[in-house]
Amino acid sequence: MATVVLTSAGNAPGVTTTALGLALAWPRPVLLVDADRNPTQAVLAGYLRGEHPGHSGLARLLQASREGRPMAAALAGETVELPALVAGNRAGFVPGFPHPGVVGLFASAWPELMSTLAAWDGDVLIDAGRIGVDGLPLSLTHGADLVLAVTRTSLVALAGLRLYLPGLAEASDRTALLLVGSGMPYGRAEVQEQFATTVAAEVAHAPAQAAVLSDGTGVPRRFAESGYFRSLRTASASIAGRLDATRELIGARR
């Protein structure tokens, strides 16, 4: 299927919350991978409320690789099922680095991780966190079918994006934008024109509703019908459709 990397230039646009929301609204089986090199364990502690403390995620995959075992054999054991918010949703989650010290040790393992995820039976969303001054690991950008730079539409957010987007676009010709809070104050057309980069999707800026995902607050009645979650469903359908169209265009079937 397809692999999508989500990242940001900074200014806390909500990459992790957006990636999680997309996974919970994805129209087909999907795997969410926490690959943030500034680990926070946000999904484990937030949406999953600390109920899976024993899953080491990427650290276990690294251990398997170092022991000469294929990551693919360890992947299922390190995947947590995400509680669905809508009927039919099937989303798994691979926790990220359990300690900052593991990040550097993973440097040589990125290529194997990406090849393992490319062979997974479903789509994969990778939360890569901030781009950082050194950029993303090349294996992430080169191995992705789509790289989405998540950004708010304020002047501060867009100024930061302007610093990092050229390097990201240079690393991957499959880069697009995902706007959180379009029209606050700049709209889709303005952003797309200024950055000469396609806006692949938009998600509503709704902090109270987003707290269900980011902080694990109780799910209110009719949450799946809220404007916020509807925007996630629309965004996920748009991104999935874009991936399908690209595969059909180049005649590739993964």
Image (spheres, grey):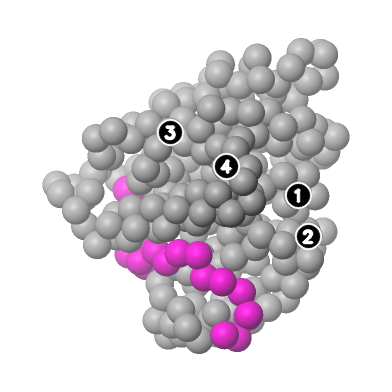
Q: CA distance from mark 1 to mark 2?
A: 7 Å
Q: Which circle marks residue 2 in the picture?
A: 4
Q: Residue furthest right?
A: 108
Q: Is residue 137 visible?
A: no
Q: CA distance from mark 4 to mark 1?
A: 13 Å
User: Residue 35, how many percent across, how many down?
Assistant: 64, 42
Q: Amino acid at mark 4?
A: Ala
Q: Residue at x 64, y 16 (%)?
A: 74
The image quadrant of residue 9 is bottom right
Q: Residue at x 53, y 81 (%)?
A: 191
Q: Amino acid at mark 3?
A: Pro
Given contact means CB atoms under 8 Å apart, are the residues at marks 2 and 4 in contact? no
Q: CA distance from mark 4 to mark 3?
A: 11 Å
Q: CA distance from mark 1 to mark 3?
A: 23 Å
Density class for disc 3 (Cα within 10 Å; few <14, some 14-19, many ≥20) is: some
Given contact means CB atoms under 8 Å apart, are the residues at marks 1 and 2 in contact? yes
- Which residue position holds label 2? 171
